[in-house]
Amino acid sequence: SIALGFWDSRSNEPSVDTGLFVIENIDLVDRIRIHNGDELIDCQAYSGGFMINDQFPMDQNLLTVLAAVFQQIRVQRPLSGQEQQEERARLMESGSHVEVYDGDQLLLSFWAGGDSLKQNSYFATEEGDVYLVSLPGYASYLSGLFELPLWQWRSRTIFHNTWRSLESFSYQDFTQPQNDFQIKYQDPFFTVSGQQQLDSNRVMHYIQDLVSLNARSLVDTTHQGIPWLELSTVDIDPRKSQTLTIYGSQSQPTVLGKSGDQYFTFSVSSLAPLMRD
C-alpha cells in the first residue's frame, strides 16, 4: 500500500518502508502477545525478566531473538495481486497474530506466517497488506519463531530465586529419606534442618548452585513412575516458587525432570552439586 511507503519519483513506483515492522525503542516493550491457533503466549515483563502466561520465566535466548527481530526486521518486498490475496487468506486462517505493547499502548501488531520449506516469511499489517520479510544474518524460517508451541517458550533455568527472596528450600530423596533436609530463612540468615553449626558460605554456594541449574532440553512427553528426587522452593514472589521432580537414578547419565506441567532432561552431573550423599 502506498500509504505505508513513499513515492520514488525516479521510477514512478512506490518504494517500501523497509523498517515498517521495526520498533525504534525496544526498551519500551514490556509485553508481547502471540496468538498461535488456540494457544496464547503472553510474554510480560517483571522484575527478573519476562514471564510466560504469568506461570513461568521466558527462555532468555528466545527473548534475545525477539528483540533482534523487532529491532532489525526488514521488508524485502510487498506482495500484490493474487499472490497477496492468497497469502493474506492463509495468514488470517493459520498465521500467528502478534501484538507488542508499552503498558496499555499498542506499539505494533501484525500477522506472521509463510512457507517454511522455501524459508519465506510473510508479515501482514492489520490493514491486510502482506510483505516478504527477513532478518539480516538469520538464515532460518523467521516466522517459525511465532509458531513455537507454548512449552518451548519456557526457560531451561528452573529456579529463579535469589537469597534475598528465597523463603525456604526443601530436598527430598525418595530412595534415601535420611538425606532429606530443608533450608529456611529465619532473620537474619538461613537455618538448615539437622545442622547446629551452620557454614554460611556453604549455604550461599548451595543456593547459587540451585539457581544455576539448567535443563539440557525441554521435551514434549509424559511420565508416570516413582520419583528419585524432589527439589522445592518457596519465594516471596509466588511466581518464583517452583517444584522440580526428578525421575531416574544417580547411575544414569541423563534423567527426566518435571516442573509444573513441563518435562526436561538433565545431565546427572549438573545435579551433582545439589545432591546429598
Image (cartoon, rainbow, N blue to C red):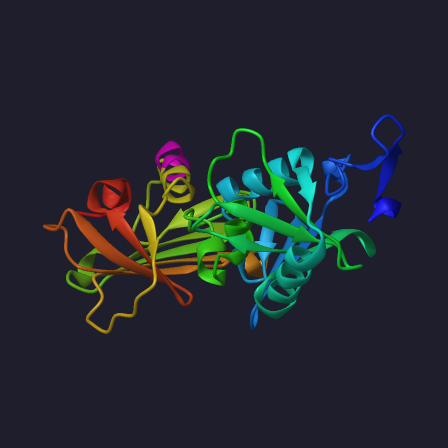
Q: Residue furthest left?
A: 251
Rendered location of residue 251, percent (x, y): 9, 50
Q: Residue 245 colored magenta? A: no
Q: Nearer the viewer, residue 146 or 1?
A: 1
Q: Is residue 135 above or below residue 52?
A: above
Q: Residue furthest front?
A: 11
Q: Is residue 273 left or right of residue 47?
A: left
Q: Residue furthest top?
A: 10
Residue 162 visible in the current orientation = no
Q: Residue at x 68, y 62 (%)?
A: 85
Counting every numbered tag in the picture gives 0
Rendered location of residue 6, percent (x, y): 87, 36
Q: Is residue 252 left or right of residue 80?
A: left
**Residues in magenta?**
200-205
Residue 140 visible in the current orientation = yes
Q: Residue at x 33, y 41 (%)?
A: 197
> Where on the picture, by quarter, is residue 134?
top right
Q: Residue at x 19, y 63 (%)?
A: 177
Q: Nearer the viewer, residue 191 or 83?
A: 83
Q: Nearer the viewer, residue 183 or 33?
A: 33
Q: Residue 203 colored magenta? A: yes
Q: Residue at x 73, y 35 (%)?
A: 18
Q: Nearer the viewer, residue 28 or 81?
A: 81
